[in-house]
Image (cartoon, rainbow, N blue to C red):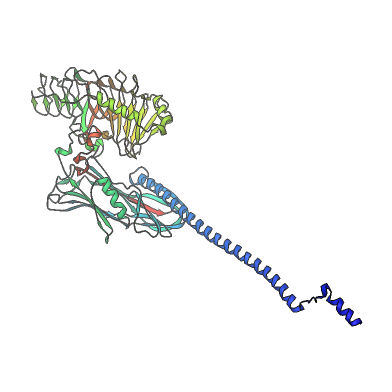
Amino acid sequence: MSNQRNTSAESGNGGRERRRPSSGVARRRDDERGTSEVVGVALMLGLVLLGTTATLAVASAGIADTMGTVNVEQSQNAMRALDADVSDVAFGRQSTRRVDVGGTSGTYTIRSDAGHITVRHREYDNTTDVVLYESDLGAVAYEHEGTRVVYQMGGIWRRDAGSDRGVMVARPTISYREETLRVPVVRVVGKGSMSSGTLAVRQRTDGSSQVYPNRSATYPDGDLYTNPSHSQGEIVVEIQSEFYRAWGPFLEEELNGSATYDHAAETVTVAISARDIDGGRVSGGVFGAITSPSNSGNLDLRSSVKMDSYDSDEGSYSDTTGANGNVTIGYDVTTSSSVDIEGSVNTSGGVTHTNAGWISGDVAYGTHCTSCSGNIGGDITATGESPSSTVLDGYLEDRVDAIDADNDNAGSQSTLTDIETNNCGSGCTLTAGNYSLKKVTLKSSSSELVLDTTDGPINLALGADAGVGSFYVGGGSDVRVVGDHRVNVYVTNRGPDSMIIDTNGGVHVDSDADGDRDYDATRLWVYGPSDGNTTLGASAGLTAAVYAPRGSSGNRTMTIQKNSEYYGAVVGHVDTIENSAQFHYDEALARTWAFPEDAVGADSQHTTVTYLLMSENEVVVEAD
């Protein structure tokens, strides 16, 4: 009985037996649960570590790329600084300079034999080629992980890793304008390498020389290396460089010629025609010191006035002084004692000449020639004629209106206001562009206006509003034109103060910005209407071409006061040149279009070389 009860009790739950799993099975399931948790954690940690590693790898690559970019950009900035300092030393503005290249991961290398230039006159006599100049260029190169940045011949060049083609970052020194090819060769001499520190730049002893023109060098036929150049053949510029592919588009654009490549030799060649037409003159040039068709009045040349010529394309005034200071007008000329005209006089009016003065060339008169029996070096004939020119009133109005409607004032408004209001005591600078302003007013001795044409021409339109439009520089103030391009000033004022360079004022050209005047009058043109006055004050200086004819009905006159100096030319009525004033005609104006619009599309301006200016300038670059 007792056994049955125990059995029933154990069965319970409706008489069904409850079975317990064996102890081995229970332990296995618990172990599996614990193992899964561990594996999950491990997997999570692995994924986190994998993600972190990938992130760090990407970040590391990004940082490396950024640092590489920073190094290359830093090297380009260093090369720009090197370019400026090499130019200063090469062209004599400084004797030594130092460039801090900083600390980079790349390497700077200096090589004297990197690159080569050859300039030849092909078939100068229709058959014979002459090498006018050839030399290694040298270079300073920076390299980092396959990317190269190189300074060569005044230009900066870059080739990225993995590319076989470079690009031009900054333009080299070769330039062409108005039938004049300029090749100031800048040679780098030196060797060595460095990754950081300073590059020392110094002028090599006897490192600068004139190549062309050069009166010590001759063609095979005995002709000197002079300008205008030989009128046959082509001037060929050939560059050998690791960046020859980048040199090609630059030479094509600058010289307006087609480039020929020799890929095996890494060279590029561009040729342009050599031509001599009337001594290089263009039909729109200015051909004498004073040109005026006015048919009334008198040009009074007072005691000790000096008139002569020079050629800014050939060199300085002192090196190129000539006897082409010609006067061609339609009214009377009177000379006083000690007047010295190194040139000819041609007038449809009369000439009254003092025997105490001197005219070196011919005298051609229309109505009379009084006291012309002596002190005249050339022929005296009654064949005088008046020149022709056109008044500019309509042209000026169109130019000023156009610039007033579309200009670059927005980025320079405060500077323009300073120029208008005599507030350039600390200096004012305008760069390439078109500007519309009421007037130019500089009156204090500390005032200076720099017109920087390095990046292109500057056009100043004065007086879009009625009653303004004057140009005044006086009191010891100065206007300075720098750079290789041209400044055109359009003056609309018709009053007595239209254009004044007053006592001790100065308007000068300093193309290379070295602080010394270079007297290139082709860089500054001032245009005026048929009415009004132009005055160059006592002891003032002016380098410019002034184009302001008054025609048959206008009243514009120009007075050049005592002890002043004028380099350039005047197309317009000059009534008086006072005692001891000097007037020097720049013969380069005969090869320059008076109106820039006329040069556009003129074949002679873009496809031929009449004047070649070439020099060699060596600098030593070393790791300091």
41, 239: nearer the viewer: 41
Residue 360 visible in the current orientation: yes
337, 382: nearer the viewer: 382
Q: Residue furthest right?
A: 2
Q: Where is residue 526 drawn, in percent x and y?
A: 28, 28
Q: Is residue 172 above or below residue 465?
A: below
Q: Residue furthest left?
A: 382
Residue 541 visible in the current orientation: no
Q: Is residue 89 above or below residue 565?
A: below
Q: Where is residue 515 drawn, in percent x and y?
A: 35, 36
522, 487: nearer the viewer: 487
Would residue 426 be found to the left or right of residue 404 on screen?
A: right
Q: Where is residue 390 drawn, in percent x and y?
A: 20, 25
Would residue 220 be found to the left or right of residue 429 on screen?
A: left
Q: Where is residue 465 drawn, in percent x and y?
A: 35, 22
Quarter of the rendering containing residue 315? top left
Quarter of the rendering containing residue 332? top left
Would residue 52 be found to the left or right of residue 575 on screen?
A: right
Residue pictured at 13% horizontal, 48% vertical: 222
Q: Quadrant of the N terminus?
A: bottom right
